[in-house]
Image: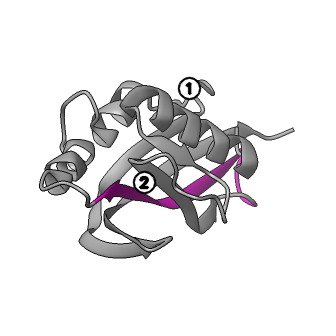
């Protein structure tokens, strides 16, 4: 399955269901309620699209995880989503549901955390954020 919209929506839905984080996959969406997440597509590679019997597509997403800074535990809450294991772990969620519910032709992995501890002001309120890099590999049989 290499349709961008389907992959993006499946990634957002999987993360929301598996971590409790409200993940928005559409640009311009507000990260509410908090904690929240915003998916941004950064790169698409069409691997072997013109050479073989299949179309391989690699999507590179960045997931912004945003928590409120109203308490002294904001960093602890952010850490729960960035940890390798645990109920709210993004990495664990994609390890357990790598196909995003789309079948064996899709595999999503968390490459790592690329930005941690950024402070944002949204609607006059301070927030703490981190950014994870997620790669989704999709393959579709050639017609």
52 is within the stretch colored magenta: yes
Q: Nearer the viewer, residue 6 or 104?
A: 6
In the rendered image, which quarter is residue 127 located in? bottom left
For the residue carrying disc 1, how many other residues have a C-alpha within 10 Å: few (<14), some (14-19), or many (20+)?
A: few
Q: Position of residue 77 (x, y in %)?
A: 21, 46
From where the camera sits, is residue 3 visible? no
Where is mark 1, residue-wise? 104
134 with respect to 42 (left or right): left
64 is within the stretch colored magenta: yes
For the residue carrying disc 2, how many other residues have a C-alpha within 10 Å: few (<14), some (14-19), or many (20+)?
A: many
Q: Position of residue 46 (x, y in %)?
A: 66, 62
Identify the residue at horizontal 66%, vertical 42% (top origin): 9
In the rendered image, which quarter is residue 109 located in? top left
Where is mark 2, residue-wise? 134
By secondary structure, the bulk of the magenta-drawn segment is best described as strand
Task: Give the CA separation, mark 1 to mark 2.
Answer: 17 Å
Element assignment for label 2? strand
Q: Please give the range of residues in magenta.
A: 50-68
């Amino acid at each position: 399955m290499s349709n961008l919209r389907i992959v993006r929506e499946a990634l957002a839905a999987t993360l929301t269901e598996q971590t409790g984080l409200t993940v928005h996959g559409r640009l311009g969406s507000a990260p509410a309620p908090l904690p929240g997440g915003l998916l941004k597509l950064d790169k698409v590679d069409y691997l072997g699209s013109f050479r073989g019997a299949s179309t391989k597509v690699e999507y590179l997403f960045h997931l912004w995880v945003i928590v409120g800074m109203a308490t002294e535990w904001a960093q602890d809450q952010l850490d729960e989503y960035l940890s390798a294991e645990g109920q709210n772990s993004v990495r664990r969620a994609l390890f357990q549901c790598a196909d995003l519910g789309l079948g064996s032709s899709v595999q999503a992995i968390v490459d790592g955390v690329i930005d941690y501890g950024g402070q944002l002001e949204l609607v006059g309120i301070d927030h703490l954020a981190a950014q994870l890099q997620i790669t989704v590999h999709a393959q579709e049989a050639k017609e």
